[in-house]
Amino acid sequence: MVFENTNISQENEGATAREPRLLIDTIADDDKTSMASMTVIDQPVTNKRSKPETRTEIASLKAQDFQISVTVIEARQLSGTNMDPVCLVQVGEDRKYTTQKESTNCPYYNEVFVFDYTSSRQIFFDKILTLTVLHSRNLIRSGTLVGKFKIDLGTVYSHQDHGFFHKWAVLTDPSDLMTGPKGYLKVDVAVVGKGDNIKIPKINDENSDDIENNLLLPEGVQPERQRARFIFKIYQAEGLPKMNTSIAEKLKTVLQGEARDLVDPFVEISFCGQKGRTTVKKNCYEPCWNEQITFTELFPPLCKRIKIQIRDKDNLNNTVIGTTFIELDRISNAGDRGFLPTFGPSYVNMYGSPRIYTMVNELSDLNNGLGEGVAFRGRLLLALSVELVDVNSSDLQGSTDVEVENIPPLSELGAGRVEEFFLFGSFLEANMISPVIAEKSVTFEVSMGNYGNGIDGANVSHRSHRSNGDGDSDEDSLSEDDHTLLLRETATIDPNMRTTSPAAKPVTHDKYYYHMPFFEQKPCIYMTSYWHDHKRRLYNSNIIQKIMDKLDEGIQDVQEMIKTNEDRPDRRLRGVAEELINGCVAYSRLVKGTGGPAAGRSKLDRERHKMCLRDIDGIANEVRKLKKRLKMSTYKEKLSKMKTLLQKLKCFCEDPQHSIPDIFIWMLSGRRRVAYSRITARQILHSVCAEECGQHCGKIQTLFLKLPGKKRLGTHGWTIQAKLELYLWLGLAKNKRDYLNGLPTGYEVIRTGTGLYSPPMYLRYQDRQQYELRAHLYQGRGLIASDDSGLSDPFAKVIFSTHCDVTQVIDETLNPTWDQTLVIPNITLFGRAEELRDDPPMIIVEIFDRDTVGKDEFIGRAVAKPVVKMNNESYEPPRFPPKLDWFQTYRGSNKAGEILASFELLQIKMGIDLEESSKITESVKTDQGHKFIVPRGIRPILAKHRVEVLFWGLRDLKRVQLISVDRPRVDIEIAGRCISSSIIQNYKKNPNFSDPVKFIEDVDLPEIEYWCPPISITAVDCRAFGRTTLVGTHIISNISKFVFRSPDKSKIFTAACKAFSKGVAGLKNNGVATETTDVFVDIDHQSTLATDMQIDMIGFGGEEPKTKEEEDSALDETALDWWSKYFASVETLAEEKKKYEEDKIQDLFNEENDDGGMNNDGDVNTLISANADDVQKEKRFGKNFLKGAMGAVMQAKKNFAAPVRRLKKQKEQIDELKIFDTELENCSEFTNFTDLLHSFDLYRGKREEMADELSDQKRIVGTFKGAFRIYRYPLPVYVEQPDAQYGMFKGLPSNEPIHVMARVYIVRATDLHPTDPNGKADPYVVVSLGSNKNNDKENYISKQLNPIFGKAFDFEATFPQESVLTVQIFDWDLLSSDDLIGETKIDLENRFYSKHRPTCGLAEKYAIFGYNQWRDPQKPSQILHKLCKEMKVDGPHFSPGKVRVGKKIFTGPIELEDENGHKKPSDEHVALVALRHWEEIPKFGNKLVPEHVETRSLYSPEKPGIEQGRVELWVDMFPMDMPPPGPPVDISPRKPKSFQLRVIIWNTDDVVLQDDDFFTGDKASDIYVKGWLLGDDKQETDIHYRSLTGEGNFNWRFIFPFDYLIAEEKCVITKKESVFSWDETEFKIPPRLNLQVWDSDHFSADDFLGSLTLDLTRFPRGAKNSNRCTLNLASEEDESSDVPMVSLFKQRRIKGWWPFTAKSEQDELEITGKVEAEISLLTVEDAEKNPAGSGRDEPSPLEKPNRPDTSFVWFMNPLKSLRYLICARYKWLIIKIVIVVILLALLVLFIYSSPSWIMKKIVGA
């Protein structure tokens, strides 16, 4: 049924009517825009509206398994000098450390840490992952913080592939606001849950070394993040519950002499791993804090949720009163016109457990925000603002610690103006009440906040005023009016408030369910409440909600059209787009003028107003473009785009600032709360504008009451506690007059008071409208097993209004066919006729399992809405009779099967019979009584089908009743027809069936596949005395994949015409098609079409001459091995993925820039005339071309089907293989290897209560292997007819046991789960096939999570007994038993019999020697002959360099080269080309498996669904009756190649001068250079003492021997980790040469001056002299730098100047010296031929450096010190002093000698 727009012109209708007759035009020009394609369907086409899905979401309550994997790879640019860094990985409170690296600022770790958690998603995603780098950590000290990085797990999980791979985390110091990053840490982070698939991308290390472009940041976050202050202002709270018992209250009153409030509240805020608290307010229900909590964090933060809690201070444990969360994404906008996070001032409502206090609270988790709160717990007034920190500000103050300070109170209107609201409700119906609850009187309570809660509602504070910050009264904080409003929250003191229905005892008609006796008299509730007026927020949300509902309904309608194969879903999607555009325009019209200032309007309100207007206008423009480009060929892509827009609208719908609290409806049994329902206030909010009203305002809605909290888990939560038909209205008191407008007419108001407008107590309905419900239940499929046998005895229970009826019981089946119509007469409904017709009440269909002993067990529930026929309507199409449809059933949150049914509700007028066409007359008698069968107009139209069943065999059958299965049989049932296989006489000897193919003739199946019944597979064991025991069952719900659809003859004809016409067009253009890039080849020698054209054949073609550069770079094939192919293929895989991502981005860019569609929607006449001209041209062409040429057309279909493929030029001369990054069977081109055999798991036993698909695998007891073919019979004559014996299973191989040799190659494992306490594992491989097992425990690899095994295992097995290959990875333990890391299983039998031939992959080229030697015992030509024979294809016909298969020609090289270089003619190359393009053979072709390596996930039985690593392998299989294969391929791990690195330190220059001279005071340094390669091979030069200019001369040689893996570009080190290690561990580190310059000190530690790190695979070429040596030569991979990069493994020798660098006090990199070095790389052989000594030793000694004479140690050379230190500087001073001293000595001597001389002269001696 299609409703089309009525404004379509008559010409359009004619074109639409003529469209089916234009066969060629329809096929060829299906995507062209026509007026017919522009038809808009704006009404629902399917009955999807009648299938509402209601299921209980308990994901937030249910604990799940999660795994966090963090790989710390390396760090770069760490701040500091001469560091010993260690990395701390912390998740929540769990900590793990890496090993400590010495003396480096760029340590390499490559260590993996795994954290396992079992928690609910909400708790788990709030955990913080912190990466911290510490300096010098040991047992005594915790280490100095270098920097840290924080991100929450929810952000990681929401990222693509649930993680970040090879990304750089920016390390910052939280306590340092002035500086930038402290370094970068390269990590892999992945967060996976149960059932998640990990896709580790193949990443090029060269690309990932670019730090700036690979930062660990979510999409949209800028790389430059600055610090910001998050300021939370906490004002006050109200409506808090009691947090102590009444006994304690009385005791405190007696002891203290006055009554006290029983709560001591404070507020705690958690953000980014930090917590801030307000002060505690003692004994206060209405605390007033007026405090501010400030967090300092990087902006934007990588933790997206803020947790706010009100807690009660307690001496033992602080109890949580309520919790709320604020999502940063919802209160900010990161766009170009966005805004910083902002919130309030606004109240946030908190919900949790019921308010009554108990010592043991079973629902305490609700107070922590886990699950849906069931009661109002209070409100908190707060505000949030964000201030960016300006690091350049001179007055930068504050701390990074959490700060708490007082703030002034908020103004009276700061939170908005208080308005009076009125809530009215009427209970029209209450049914489905459990008999247990019905034993007592039942009443219903409606509350909003604390209003209406009469049991544990508002607590009147014993304080006269709110408490201020010091515990004293603050008389100005609230006015007297505010106190009056607060006191009104207590329902008991307001006589005009009625919030509970009268207590009554439920009654019943059928004893299945009870209902309340609300017959003619409907009880009413009403209340007046006072809230701050923020209704504008709710109005805007309601408008967007209605747009979303309309869009969602349209999308589901389109999806239902696709599912049911309705015509032209693109037209309906165009109508959905039109509705969305109209809705967006209406939103802009209604909201545009409402963003002005008002009381309580916050900054977030203003910003959201602008953002929503802007983005919704953008959505409208986007949909307009989408609508223009919408075609039949692109509607699925556009449908996906519409789903994206729906998700975008959901982000705008809910306003993050809470306004009015939610409404709770509780069912009370006595005074005990039993079940509840929760409604948001905006859903029932009234507005004078219809678009702004809530979706349920003034309407009757159906509510299902549920159990609170974790009580919903398990069997108790499956049942509905009660179903309410409730009318609710909420609005301002001034609009109170409208609250009865939406009620069904015909009521009489019974009021409480004498006032005319006083609310009514009851609504009395005198008039009754009688209806009759007909539930047509045809069948069910895939129901949950409820019996121990794995089956059920299902019956359906239909509940509508207060009536209930049941179907008959179908014994022992999961696919019951009830074929029953339940008629429920005399149903009384109250409501408007038009409302009931458009939105009828819901029908509940519950499926139960009948148990002879005990209570019937619940299976599942479906919800539906009937098609309503009023008494003035005719029972005729298109609405009647209603169509059958599948309704999904749920048990809790899990799917529980489907039922095929339809429902109709007929209005009955008293005294008037129904129409004859609508009467139910067909009934049958069964052993359970009479039943009405589904009428013929409703039941599906059936057609005769033939079902062919391939019974292949049974596998892995478990014991039944402790007895092994010996003689099994399989029964197949479909549509009531059953067929049994032959009995396997000895299951252990041969588990295959002797008679493989059987038929079920004349099976009545629906013509529409959507209605087809399921296939039931039942395996039984035939035992002695005719007994049979059920082994297991399997249900195939969707049989469409087994249905063979006969092709339409006209479509074949038209497609052939199209192909031939395009081929002719290609011939006219020199063999190139005009619309595609394919070149079509005609190889029919009798055809004259291809005689004048040059045809490019499929294949290798001629080889282009090699250039000199290519010849020089040609690889020596003798040096190549299998690993050469492997690593070349890994590189190719990475390039393909990169190109795929680039192509996706380019496609998106092209789509955005493609206007498409019609430029002028109104130019209809031009379009119609153009279409008419095209039609006439196509008709003339068709007549002239197709006349008498039917045979040519059919031939053209085959000839022009295969495009020519040209081989791309390969980057290297290495043959490659295909690497699949998933399991081979999961590749789309191989269809799970089910082209012949399907595997169906057999289930037995009762399904567990909380079981999901993974945990339900415990019920698997075996596997049935077989297949089905279903088709209309007889087949058309132009279709190939089935074989008389095997039907459509032609060419079926024998299923007798066959001996096979299986060769398993285990290449390597990656990302294994660590099992040892040190975070490592000692893995080894165990491979088993049947009873054969190969245990490689002796060759375990020590302490590796990415081991390379390189093993090949041969097995001789017999299919089918030994057909499942199991590969297990174990962890070797010295003392305890070995731990299973993970395992994977491969079904070899399905592979062996598959047409894709995965037995031995096809190599890229054929070779008889070398690394690419052909390993299949059959040559390509033999394989090609065999395939042609099996498929009955003409060929192969070989000629030199060519082969013809059918109508296809393939070309290839002619000659084959042997080991000696001799060439001889061979057909193997062209045969291999044909095999590698076998899928291009028309009709018979399919993709053959190439030579490959597949990647399989490993899983552990202890942690099902969580990947424990991956293993790369491939399997070859060879039948034992064929020639034996050659030796296995040698894939043993490559041994590292030994090299010797020689580094000569010639000179240094411009080294910073660190010391002051002891004698002279000049700046000087005692320079020496330290170097190492592997970390423990440090070497030092001698010391150049007293360098006064920074120049140093050394002539010193470092020699570093090392082992190197060329393919992985890693150095290999084998050593023991510690003295306690049992054996040596292999480490792989990058080849990095580390050089450091130091200043030597004799009496203190040496001073570090600078460092230089050179990656030998890629480092900057050195400068020619010291002056040209700049800071650019020290950059670690700067894409913008023009410095040439070299690899020492290619250049082998280089000499130049490189800079030493270090971080300055401003944390900037600066040059601290320069070094002239010569670096050479030699193999061990070359090093032995040209030996050299270390330092300046023999052999090949270096000359001593020509150092200045001032280079010496002063205390070791005193004479030199006198000469160079004293004499050189103080020479003249010393001479002067000596002269003066001599003169003084002479003078003293003269004075001393003169007296004696004078006496001698006097005496005359």
Image (cartoon, rainbow, N blue to C red):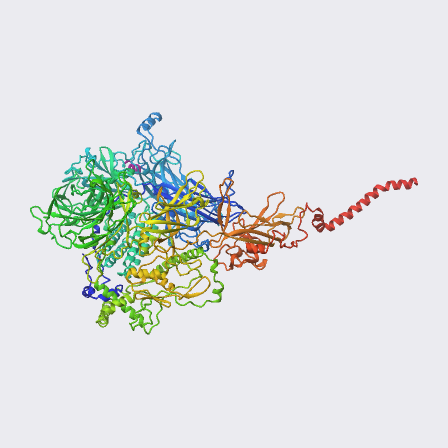
For the stretch drawn in magenta, the main secondary structure is helix
Q: Which residues are magenta?
A: 480-487
**Residue 302 position in % (x across, y down):** 40, 47
Task: Inspect the magenta stretch and tell me whether residue 780 lies in it.
Answer: no
**Residue 122 position in % (x across, y down):** 34, 43
Quadrant in the picture for the C terminus: top right
**Residue 789 position in % (x across, y down):** 24, 41
Residue 982 visible, this angle? yes
* Left or right relative to 1471: residue 551: left
Quadrant in the picture for the N terminus: bottom left
- Number of callouts: 0
Residue 1219 visible, this angle? no
Residue at 33% across / 58% down in the picture? 1487
**In the current view of this chain or complex, which residue is farthest to the bottom?**
1092
Task: Judge by depth and name the residue closer to the eye, 692 or 321.
Answer: 321
Task: Judge by depth and name the residue closer to the eye, 1517 or 1267.
Answer: 1517
**Residue 977 position in % (x across, y down):** 18, 49
User: Image quadrant of residue 474?
Assistant: top left
